[in-house]
Image (cartoon, helix red, strand yellow):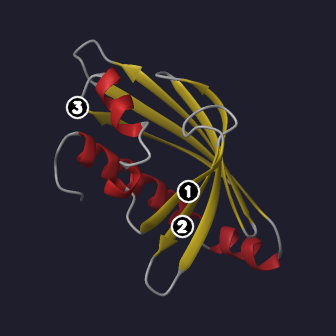
Amino acid sequence: MQYTHSILIDLPLKQTIAKMDSLENLKKWQDGLVETTVISGKFGEEGAKTRLKYDFGSRKMTLLETIIKTNMPHELVASYTTKGVYNEQHNRFKATDDGKTIWESDSTFKFEGLGMKLVGLLFPKSFEKQSLKYMKAFKAFAEGNPTP
């Protein structure tokens, strides 16, 4: 499953990336994130691995983030794995002529096991909605607005 989302952030590129490239800021815009642990490398750098623990009430989830490629402030490629799910995100950041930032994100999901393949097949829009929700939450955080 693949999809792309784009969002306009009302901040210059340099300020947008400074807010995004911060381990401490993740909890400020990622709903449900309760714990972050860098397990190898330096957060945000190529090869770094970070464990992200989420609590959504009745559903708990742990993801392993691996930075595949970084060319910041313009590009960041990362993978996120959990039981039965592999997600790779290609993020691009572009400065606009009027001092704003365009964030484009291509997401690719691969599912393993019958259960997760069925989830991906039956509920593909839920993955897209979650990705867009986090992009909108980051925008609100970065611009200093309450999370939507």
Residue 128, percent from left and from top: 51, 57
Which residue is at 40% across, 51% downward? 26
Which residue matches tag 1? Answer: 37
115 on left or right of 40 = right
Instruction: Tell me which label, 1 or 2, sits earlier in the chain.
Output: 1
Picture quadrant where residue 114 is located: bottom right
Disc number lying in front (1 or 2): 1
Viewer-side label of 2, 3: 2
Label of residue 53 in the image: 2
**Disc ID at residue 10:** 3
Above or below for 122 versus 30 = below
Q: Residue furthest right?
A: 113
Closest to the observer: 14 or 102? 14
| Residue 122 image position (x, y, % from top left) | 64, 74
Figure quadrant of the N terminus: bottom right
Viewer-side residue, 146 vs 19: 19
Look at the numbered discs 1 and 2 and tell me whether their residues touch, using CB distance below 8 Å.
yes
| Residue at the (55%, 40%) spot, across then down | 43
Q: Find numbered disc 3 in the image and state the secondary structure of the residue it sits on.
A: loop
What amino acid type should be assigned to the residue bearing mark 3? Asp
Between disc 1 and disc 3, the foreground one is: 1
The crowd level at tag 2 (other Cα within 10 Å; few <14, some 14-19, many 20+) is: some
Q: Amino acid at mark 1?
A: Thr
